[in-house]
Structure formats: C-alpha cells, structure tokens
Amino acid sequence: MITALVIGVLGVLLVLGVPVAFAMGIAGITGIFLIGDNIAITPKIFYQTFIIYELLAVPLFVLMSQILLVGKVGDHLFSVINRWVQHWPGGLGVSSVLACGFFSAVCGSSTATAATVGTTAIPAMLKRDYPKPYAFGMVAGGGTLGILIPPSIPMILYAAITSESVGKLFMAGVVPGLMLIAMFVVYTIILSYVRGNMPRVPKAPLSERAALTLQHSGAIILPVVVLGGIYAGIFTPTEAAAIGSIYSLLLCGIVYRSLRISDIVPILLTTLRITCMLMLIIGAAMLMARVFTTLQIASSIMSFIEAREIGKWTFLISVNLVWLIMGMFMEVASIMLITLPIVFPVALGLGIDPIWFAVIMVINMELATITPPVGLNLFVLMGVMNERDLGMIIRGVMPPFIIIVLGLVLVMVFPSIATWLPGLL
C-alpha cells in the first residue's frame, strides 16, 4: 500500500510537470513519513550522497565538456577526421560518426556530443547535398555514443548507486561503443551505394592529412591523457576528470585561443546548473532508495519472480521495455536513478553480471536521448541548427535508432562484448 502511494505521488507530480528532483524528493519524504522513519534523516541522506567521492567526477566531466564545446574543439576534430575519410563512400557521414565517437571519448555527455559535432558536420553535409533527414539523424544517433564510450556520466551514476568500479564500467563501454561506430559506418557506406546521393570528395594528399593531424594533435591526444591515465592506473576517474578539465582549458585558451576570458563565467554557470540538477536528482533518488529498501521492494519482486519461475531473460526483456517507455518521457539521469535501486538487486539475485547489466542499461539510455517526444538530442539539434521541422529529424533518426537496438540485442546475446575488456583488469 505504501509503495503504491509513493509511486503514485511520484507519477502525479511528474505528470503535473514538477521538476524530477523535487518530484522524487517529495515522494521520498512522503515515503519516509508513511513508514514511520525519522523525517530528520532526509538532510543526512542528501549530505551522505553529496560526499560520495566518485560523484566528484560528474561536475569535472561536465566542466570539461563545456570547455570543449565553447572552445569548438569538435570543429578541429571533425576537420582532421574528414580529411582522412572524405573520399570514402558517404565520406562526410562517416566523418560525422567518427567525430561523434572521438568526441565521446573526451566528453561523457550525449547532448554535448551532438551539439558540438552537429554545428560543423550538418552544414558540411547539407552543403554537399546530403539528404537532410540523414544529416540530422546520423548526428543525433552518433551523439548518443557520448554516454556509452568512456568517460560516461551515466556510468558514474551507476557506480555511485551500485558501488561497482568506475574503471571497469568505463572499460565495459569501449567495445560496445566501437561496435556501434562500426555499424553506423557500414550503414552509411551501404546507403551511399544504394541511394547514390551522397557525393564523394577527392582524396586529400597524404602530406595535407599528416600536417593537419599534427596541427591538431593536442586535441587528438586528450582521450589518451584521460582514459590512458585511468587504465594505466596513474590516476582515478575523478583525478582524470580534473586533469582533463585543466588540459582542455589550456588547449582551448592557449593553443587554439578559441576560449576568451569572458567565456569562463558562462561555462562555470552552465556547469553549476547541470551539476546542481544532477546532484539533486541523485540525492532524491537515494531518499527513495531508502524507502524502497525499508519496504523490501526488491525482496518482494524476487519472491514474485521465484514463485512464478520467471527467468533472467524474461526479466531483462521486461526491464528493457520499461526503459524504452520511460525514455519517451524522461531524461537519462532520472530514469536511471528511479529504476536502479529497484531493478539492480533483482538483477543480482537472478545472477546477472552487474557490468553487463550496466552496458545494457546505458544502451537503453542512448535510445532515450533520441526517442520522441522528449529525446533531448533531437531538440538540441533543433536549437543549435535553428531547425523547426521536428518530424524531419525524427524520420532521420529512425535508422540510427534501429542500429542501436540491434547493437543492444547483440550485447544481450553475447555478454562478452561488454565483459571481456573489464575482465582483463
């Protein structure tokens, strides 16, 4: 009864348009009151959440992504990659996908990846008469890689809730991320041959490609600095985020000189706004987790599953469908923090590998960023490109959506895609 009331309060508040953090907080406090717990525990739960060391990486990675976004590093990465593959079938489309993948390795955010690459890649494709739905759809789909390829903010949130290793979670996203990039590239090349409406550009001289690569080597080695340091055991993910932020600031401010002193305050304010939103959601989620733990929701679900002999595949398919539906109406952090405290203990009880489960969840969250009516990547591209035809973007994003679903199926059928690399640690 109490569980139904808590979930009901949360649902009503979300339907009324109350911000997710406040809706979850009110529902959590309602639950605390109904179970007879001390209401004074609320600020303590928020405090204990905010001092989790792993979560310090969140604002630092957000800061790094904002510096790179404002500093237009994505433009430089796209220009380098495009010089190397512009002569391929669908070369500009391939460049867009590879640029999204590369920027994902320094960003951790899906929307930042789509916005950064989109401002350069979409005009370039449209100038070469690429189909408009394809141009928008491929960047929106490629932008989803920002939360799968490490560093990944959703992986950090997963680690904070489940106490899994951030390093292993980061490594788990590498192979699935590369697989999705390859699938996007193959799709683009095949589409180029089938439709014949993606003009090819003459092959750039090797000397030109080498010179441009050397010129922008500072941006190219950023993922090596951040991820290489983590995997080599030189520093923790949190320390890597701090080093990456400082490196990005020096790169954009001194090397490229694309960052002005006047940009610093807006960058910090944006970082503060995003961080406060995420931390409030996390704190409220921990409050609800306290209620669900006290009510033994996970144990009740496990008892239900055991009584009806429901296997792990039925559970996984059911959870995937729930995430797909939630992804139509909510953003990534909210979905993860509402569902993880409930489904994670059940997944462990069914013998599901927590690292594998994390990758399955994050790929579902990729889908959430491009699923209408509230797919954030769709609206980000509408904003940065001043485009009003949402229907056109939705049509364009359907092929990437299908590709990601196919990638999800492959990861579910072959768990080693996600677990092989972390297993080497």
Image (cartoon, rainbow, N blue to C red):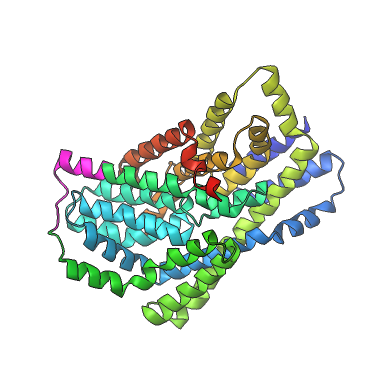
In the image, residue 356 sits, relative to residue 152, either above or below, namely above
- Front-lying residue, 341 or 35: 341
Is residue 386 visible in the rendered image? The answer is no
Q: Residue at x 68, y 48 (%)?
A: 285
In the image, residue 205 sits, relative to residue 7, either above or below, namely below
- Residue 193 locus on image (x, y percent): 16, 41
Q: Residue at x 14, y 53 (%)?
A: 200
- Front-lying residue, 169 or 127: 169
Q: Position of 31 compared to 205: left or right? A: right
Q: Position of 395 compared to 52: left or right? A: left
- Residue 267 locus on image (x, y percent): 50, 71
Q: Residue at x 38, y 80 (%)?
A: 255
Q: Quadrant of residue 187?
A: top left
- Front-lying residue, 61 or 209: 209
State the quadrant of the N terminus: top right
- Residue 382 locus on image (x, y percent): 36, 54
Q: Position of 235 compared to 148: left or right? A: right
Q: Residue at x 16, y 64 (%)?
A: 204
Q: Quadrant of residue 268?
A: bottom right
Is residue 40 visible in the rendered image? The answer is yes
- Residue 150 locus on image (x, y percent): 49, 55
Residue range of the region highlighted in magenta in the rendering: 187-201
In the image, residue 143 sits, relative to residue 216, either above or below, namely above
Q: Is residue 211 magenta?
A: no
Q: Quadrant of residue 385?
A: bottom left
Give the number of callouts: 0
In the image, residue 215 sits, relative to residue 45, either above or below, namely below
Does the magenta stretch mainly form a helix, a strand or a loop?
helix
